[in-house]
């Protein structure tokens, strides 16, 4: 299903933008879903006339827990670009109901880091010979990456699967002269043909990929083209895993930059982007109060699961973490979450959320153990992260964002987004300011590949730390913040110990 079709169907669910006084849950859902802007990392500005009360204190606490700083309206030092004003959610534009051009312009207005990095990219590289194929979820933020690279002089073509396509954005990109290979009505065979057509028509020398599927298709079906690639920039955890495995098996035909492994991607995109928007999208589907007193199991305590768990706890959920890695479970325990064996929590959970990116995280037998009417969903996600391919045809309605799922010899559950990643299939995807950072890393990866063209082996590479630091510096400046520099230590600092004093006497204190 297309994003636009999803947007249309959501009118049957909880689209009311009425915000009760001091109701953070309703406000966060409405603002996040209407604007697709990030609440995490922004400032919430409270009205000067909001009286002090326990309810106000709770609102401030929830905003802090969500990752927002708080100020009063009279505080002239508050940055404006990254501020949101409570409770004015009903006064902001609803990007779900805008045209493709309006949605793209709105996104570009709030992506200053990407704009700065593309400008630098253009100043340092000849872009006229670049042919860049993109395989990403096609929505307004992705379109800005394509638009800016095309405006910089590169030839750009983009492929999107029918389930990850916003048709209004595809139409707008085509009107701007950017080739789009996508159709919401394509079946599997047509989707493969569309992807191959992009490869054959553009003949890319760079690929920006999401999940490694497009670049692996090139390696399998167009090996001569794949062997000539300058490189691939990969966006996701699951995609990097696939390329790492190909390198280990000595079948990787091109250099890959693991964009996902950059701190400026994973540290923000996964935890604050996916974690935040999956929470507000589930609210959009089930109601703003759906997490209050909800017994909720999160499977996987990586960045996505962690970011989601922390936010739904803020909204009142009783969260239990299930993870196979004892280090992840210990971290969860130190962050206030009980950790249990998944088989212990399934029968008592009102909601089960998979956040692993691993095939068959929830098996058919585990679905049978769930309580009737429990909600089952994936955040982030890969195909069949839930073992839906083990179910008979007709077990649920693929056309609905909330569908009854009849488990054979088991309970009837509520399945969200047909088991796909809930925030990008039933919502607007990760917030604009988060993707601003992620796509800045993508642009930096392209620059790094060009800087090292002809010097790279067919291997998976991680970007240098300095790249992350530069992106972070630009992002801080855009928000009106700054670092606190200090004088670096000399090369001989290793010679100084706690026992050394200016007069040569040893210290008697620790």
Image: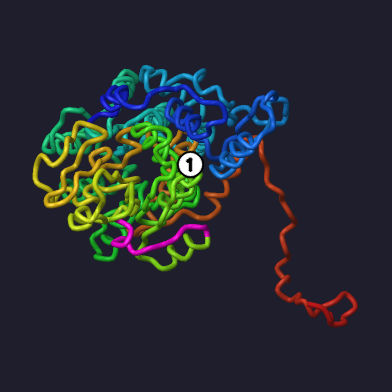
Hey, which quadrant is residue 75 in on the image?
Answer: top right
State whether residue 35 appears in this view: yes
Name the spot of residue 110 as percent of width and height, x first: 51, 29
Q: How many marks?
A: 1
Which one is nearer the viewer's eye here, 372 or 420? Answer: 372
Hey, which quadrant is residue 207 in on the image?
Answer: top left
Q: Which residue is mark 1?
A: 315
Which one is nearer the viewer's eye here, 356 or 156? Answer: 356
Name the spot of residue 92 as percent of width and height, x first: 50, 20
**Residue occupying image coordinates x 35% and y 49%:** 236
Display coloring = rainbow
Which one is nearer the viewer's eye here, 197 or 356? Answer: 356
Hey, which quadrant is residue 248 in on the image?
Answer: bottom left
Instruction: State which quarter of the image contains the C terminus.
Output: bottom right
Name the spot of residue 378 as percent of width and height, x first: 31, 46
Instruction: State which quarter of the image contains the N terminus.
Output: top left
State whether residue 128 appears in this view: no
Residue 340 in the image: above or below residue 136: below
Residue 376 in the image: above or below residue 335: above
Residue 264 in the image: above or below residue 11: below
Say if the magenta span includes residue 336: yes
Which one is nearer the viewer's eye here, 509 or 213? Answer: 509
Q: Is residue 290 left or right of residue 272?
A: left
Which residue is at the far left?
393
**Residue occupying image coordinates x 90% and y 78%:** 503
Q: Residues within 10 Å of mark 1 (few under 14, many from 20)?
A: many
Residue 168 in the image: above or below residue 146: above
Say if the magenta span includes residue 33: no
Q: Is residue 204 left or right of residue 453?
A: left
Image: magenta residue range: 335-346
Name the spot of residue 157 as percent of width and height, x first: 29, 32
Which residue is at the far right?
503
């Amino acid at each position: 299903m297309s994003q636009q079709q999803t947007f249309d169907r959501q009118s049957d669910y909880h689209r009311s933008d009425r915000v009760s006084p001091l109701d953070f849950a309703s406000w966060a859902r409405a603002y996040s879903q209407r604007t697709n802007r990030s609440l995490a990392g922004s400032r919430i500005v409270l009205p000067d006339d909001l009286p002090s009360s326990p309810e106000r204190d709770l609102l401030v606490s929830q905003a802090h827990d969500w990752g927002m700083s708080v100020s009063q309206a009279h505080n002239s030092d508050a940055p404006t670009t990254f501020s949101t004003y409570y409770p004015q959610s009903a006064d902001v534009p609803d990007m779900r109901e805008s045209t493709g051009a309006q949605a793209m312009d709105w996104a570009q207005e709030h992506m200053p880091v990407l704009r700065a990095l593309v400008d630098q990219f253009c100043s340092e590289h000849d872009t006229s010979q670049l042919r860049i194929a993109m395989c990403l979820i096609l929505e307004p933020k992705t379109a800005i990456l394509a638009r800016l690279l095309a405006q910089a002089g590169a030839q750009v073509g983009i492929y999107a699967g029918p389930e990850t396509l916003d048709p209004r954005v595809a139409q707008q990109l085509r009107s701007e002269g950017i080739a789009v290979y996508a159709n919401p009505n394509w079946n599997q065979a047509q989707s493969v043909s569309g992807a191959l057509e992009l490869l054959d028509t553009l003949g890319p020398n760079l690929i920006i990929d999401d999940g490694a599927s497009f670049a692996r298709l090139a390696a399998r079906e167009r090996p001569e083209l794949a062997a000539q690639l300058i490189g691939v920039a990969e966006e996701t955890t699951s995609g990097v895993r696939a390329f790492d495995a190909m390198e280990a098996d000595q079948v990787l035909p091109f250099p890959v930059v693991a964009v996902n492994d950059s701190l400026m991607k994973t540290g923000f995109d996964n935890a604050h982007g996916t974690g935040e928007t999956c929470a507000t999208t589930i609210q959009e589907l089930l109601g703003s109060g759906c997490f209050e007193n909800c017994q909720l199991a999160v499977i996987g305590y990586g960045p996505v699961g962690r970011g989601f768990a922390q936010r739904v706890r803020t909204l009142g959920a009783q969260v239990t973490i299930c993870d196979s890695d004892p280090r992840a479970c210990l971290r969860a325990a130190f962050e206030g979450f009980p950790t249990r064996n998944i088989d212990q929590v399934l029968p008592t959970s009102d909601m089960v959320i998979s956040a692993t990116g691993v095939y068959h995280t929830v098996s058919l037998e585990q679905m049978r153990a769930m309580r009737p009417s429990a909600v089952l969903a994936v955040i982030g996600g890969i195909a069949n992260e839930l073992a839906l391919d083990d179910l008979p045809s007709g077990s649920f309605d693929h056309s609905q964002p909330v569908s009854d799922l009849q488990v054979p010899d088991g309970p009837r559950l509520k399945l969200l987004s047909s088991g796909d990643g809930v925030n990008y299939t039933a919502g607007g995807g990760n917030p604009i300011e988060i993707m601003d950072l992620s796509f800045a890393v993508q642009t930096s990866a392209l620059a790094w590949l060009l800087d090292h063209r002809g010097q790279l082996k067919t291997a998976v590479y991680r970007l240098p730390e300095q790249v992350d630091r530069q992106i972070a510096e630009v992002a801080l400046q855009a928000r009106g913040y700054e670092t606190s520099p200090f004088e670096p230590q000399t090369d001989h600092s290793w010679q100084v110990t706690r026992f050394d004093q200016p007069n040569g006497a040893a210290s008697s204190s620790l």
